[in-house]
Image (cartoon, rainbow, N blue to C red):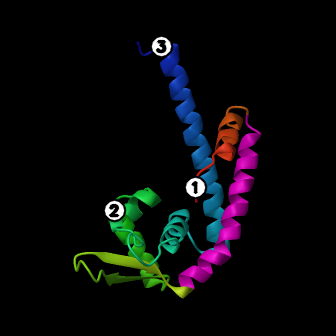
Amino acid sequence: MTATDPALTALAQGWCALSLLHGKIEAHIERALQAGHDLSVREYSLLDVLSRQHQGPGGHLQMKQVADAVVLSQSATTRLVTRLEDRGLLTRYLCDTDRRGIYTDVTEAGLTLLTEARPTNDTALRAALDEAAEHPELAPLVRAVEGLKVPA
């Protein structure tokens, strides 16, 4: 294939459309969460991921798993956890079975904020998708997102 190969051009255009859709959605949700709850998209995502942990085997996520879930580096995730911990939304403690491991839990204040912010996130997501669906180059991607059946 050459640099002017139509297949490569179509692939690059598809990637640009996907990147544009992601950017539009994230920016829309970011504005709504910041205005309504003083939360960033990353902070909301972190609270959401950590709120789904449970007690028992495999119930708590290691920091690498958390980083992967919120799509950040481990160092950026650690900084984010520290910011939310400073706000009283998260706590950290040592793992009972492995003193090297540190767990992070959402506090009651964090769960309350997450509960309050969830409808804002959901409404902003719906609005961003509806707006994006009006653009012919993004409409197929919106339909694909809407059709995903991802387990909770």
Using the image as rendered, state which of residue 40 and residue 139 is in the foreground: 139
Q: Which mark is residue 64?
A: 2
Mark 2: give few (<14), some (14-19) or many (20+) Cα within 10 Å.
some
Hey, which quadrant is residue 127 in on the image? Answer: bottom right
Q: Say whether residue 132 is magenta.
A: yes
Give residue 74's position: percent from left, percent from top.
Answer: 33, 62
Q: Give the mark toward the camera: 1 or 3.
A: 1
- Residue 15, relative to residue 95: is it above or below? above
Say if mark 1 contacts mark 2, CB within 8 Å: no
Hey, which quadrant is residue 116 in on the image? Answer: bottom right
Q: Amino acid at mark 1?
A: Pro
Q: Amino acid at mark 2?
A: Lys
Say if mark 1 contacts mark 3, CB within 8 Å: no
Give residue 113's position: percent from left, percent from top.
Answer: 61, 79
Q: Residue at x 69, y 34 (%)?
A: 140
Q: Say whether residue 36 is magenta.
A: no
Using the image as rendered, state which of residue 46 and residue 38 is in the foreground: 46
Question: Where does label 3 land, which residue?
Answer: 5
The residue segment tinted magenta is 109-135
Tell me which numbered mark, 1 or 3, is placed earlier along the sequence: 3
Q: Could you give the CA–CA distance between mark 1 and mark 3, rounded to whole angstroms?
A: 37 Å
Question: Where does label 1 land, which residue?
Answer: 151
Q: Amino acid at mark 3?
A: Asp
Side of 4 relative to 109 (left or right): left
